Image: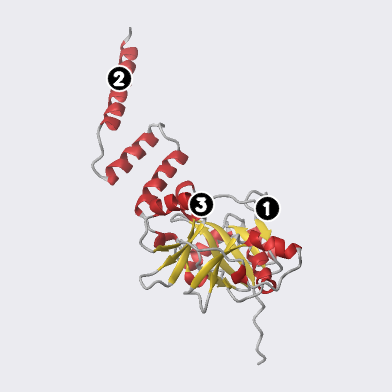
């Protein structure tokens, strides 16, 4: 055996010893555990997706529903006394599957309306029925509930949405099972996200736009004039305008467009709702 081969064997044994020592030692803090995971990634024992999901699980075990909930002001709600014919356009435009049903105001959530429950009435053209006749019981949870506990409760109750209440019992926002899962696995594609196009038209004035949409493609589609030399994507434009990575529900108006963040994590924006606004009237001098 030559010296070069002996050195390679020694290096291999040394690396194996260090690796076994790395995982044999029990981490005493969360920071040590994360450091060990990153070391495993560097040594190609974990791929990037696996590392990201494990970190997401750790985050879910610490975060609370208040950290990811859709704020009350941003909830798409329907009044309990409204007739189906009054709320149907909203259901079609927003394309949500569930809606909080409110009483006197947004702080008083009295139930949940499932979009699929409207189908038999639409089919029979019986649209005078009030929403309160169709609503289901809502699940109420405190702002302080941990996300891992919330996820387990969603599974046990076969629920997909919960209304988050404050210390006074008023609705503070809502959280869905998808919101929690996205903290672990990242953006979950729906049937619209799976399409090749970056932009999906929901109604005459409302669109869903992927944040990775190139500025030039956005300009071509909407006949806009955002500067492509300043930003590559529409998500980059939004982050730069706000000066930070926005949370879900944050809005910003740019010209004749109202942008609302539908999906985002602590690193980047994933999905936007774009609403075309009426042009501002010009004042005569």
Mark 2 in CB contact with mark 3 (< 8 angstroms): no
Determine the secondary structure under disc 1: loop
Q: Quadrant of residue 77?
A: bottom right
* On screen, residue 41 above or below 146: above
Q: Is residue 198 left or right of residue 63?
A: right
Query: Can residue 108 be seen by looking at this rendering?
Result: yes
Q: CA distance from mark 1 to mark 3?
A: 33 Å
Residue picked out by circle 3: 158
Query: Can residue 220 be seen by looking at this rendering?
Result: no
Residue picked out by circle 2: 13
Determine the secondary structure under disc 3: loop
Q: Quadrant of residue 14?
A: top left
Q: CA distance from mark 1 to mark 2?
A: 51 Å
Determine the secondary structure under disc 2: helix
- Please name whichever residue, 148 or 44, is drawn nearer the observer in this view of the structure: 148
Q: Residues within 10 Å of mark 1 (few under 14, many from 20)?
A: few
What residue is shown at x 68% (from left), y 52% (from top)? 197
Residue picked out by circle 1: 197
Q: Residues within 10 Å of mark 3 (few under 14, many from 20)?
A: few
Mark 1 in CB contact with mark 2 (< 8 angstroms): no
Q: How is the image coloured?
A: secondary structure
């Amino acid at each position: 055996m030559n010296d070069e081969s002996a050195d390679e064997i020694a290096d291999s044994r040394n690396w194996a010893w260090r690796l076994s020592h790395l995982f044999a030692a029990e981490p005493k803090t969360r920071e040590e555990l994360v450091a060990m995971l990153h070391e495993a990634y560097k040594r190609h024992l974990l791929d990037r997706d696996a590392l990201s999901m494990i970190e997401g699980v750790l985050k879910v075990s610490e975060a609370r529903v208040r950290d990811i909930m859709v704020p009350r002001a941003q909830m798409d709600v329907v009044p309990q006394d409204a007739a189906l014919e009054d709320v149907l356009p909203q259901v079609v435009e927003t394309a949500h599957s569930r809606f909080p049903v409110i009483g006197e105001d947004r702080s008083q959530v009295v139930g949940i309306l499932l979009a699929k429950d409207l189908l038999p009435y639409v089919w029979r053209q019986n649209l005078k029925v009030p929403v309160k006749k169709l609503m289901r019981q809502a699940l109420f949870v405190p702002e302080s509930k941990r996300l891992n506990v919330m996820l387990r409760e969603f599974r046990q109750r076969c629920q997909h949405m919960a209304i988050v209440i404050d210390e006074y019992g008023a609705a503070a926002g809502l959280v869905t099972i998808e919101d929690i899962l996205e903290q672990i696995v990242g953006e979950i594609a729906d049937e619209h996200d799976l399409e090749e196009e970056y932009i999906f038209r929901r109604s005459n004035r409302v669109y869903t736009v992927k944040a990775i949409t190139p500025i030039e493609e956005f300009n071509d589609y909407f006949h806009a004039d955002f500067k492509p030399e300043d930003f590559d994507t529409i998500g980059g434009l939004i982050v730069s305008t706000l000066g930070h990575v926005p949370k879900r529900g944050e809005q910003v108006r740019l010209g004749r467009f109202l942008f609302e963040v539908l999906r985002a994590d602590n690193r980047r924006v994933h999905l936007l709702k774009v609403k075309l606004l009426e042009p501002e009237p010009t004042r005569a001098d």
